[in-house]
Image (tube, rainbow, N blue to C red):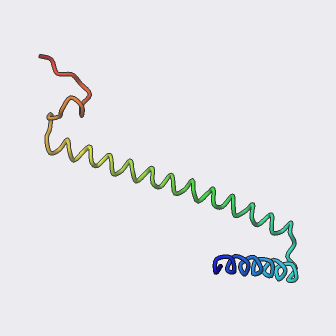
């Protein structure tokens, strides 16, 4: 029952916010343009974050490979090196 009341109040608040926006001179075309700009900005931010995470992953994995080679030069299992040992 309380959830239903909260839903009704939130819908009323949304309607009032839209009416106040319209009264202050905002138009629906302007609102649509801002939403589209926000979508472009969000996509740009997503791409930048993905690039940064990719770069970070390469740096971390690159250092991991270098440190394991430094610790045991020439040592490694078949699975790690991808080479078969001759017997």
Q: Is residue 6 above or below residue 36?
A: below
In the image, is 24 to the left or to the right of 67?
Answer: right
Q: Is residue 44 above or below residue 58?
A: below
Residue found at the far top of this picture: 87
Q: Quadrant of residue 11?
A: bottom right
In the image, is 65 to the left or to the right of 45?
Answer: left
Residue 4 is situated, as x and y percent measured from the top left of the image, at: 68, 76
Residue 66 is situated, as x and y percent measured from the top left of the image, at: 24, 44
Could you say which is closer to the camera, residue 15 or residue 43? 15
Name the residue: 86% across, 69% down.
Answer: 28
Name the residue: 63% across, 60% down.
Answer: 42
Could you say which is closer to the camera, residue 52 or residue 31? 31
Residue 30 is situated, as x and y percent measured from the top left of the image, at: 83, 68
In the image, is 40 to the left or to the right of 54?
Answer: right
Q: Quadrant of residue 6?
A: bottom right
Q: Quadrant of residue 12?
A: bottom right
Could you say which is closer to the camera, residue 36 or residue 68? 36
Name the residue: 47% across, 55% down.
Answer: 52
């Amino acid at each position: 029952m309380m959830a239903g009341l909260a839903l009704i109040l939130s819908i009323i608040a949304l309607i009032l916010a839209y009416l106040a926006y319209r009264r202050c001179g905002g138009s629906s075309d302007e609102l649509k343009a801002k939403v589209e700009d926000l979508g472009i900005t969000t996509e740009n931010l997503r791409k930048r974050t993905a690039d940064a995470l990719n770069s970070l992953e390469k740096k971390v994995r690159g250092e991991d490979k270098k440190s394991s080679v430094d610790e045991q030069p020439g040592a490694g299992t078949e699975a790690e090196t991808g080479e078969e040992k001759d017997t």
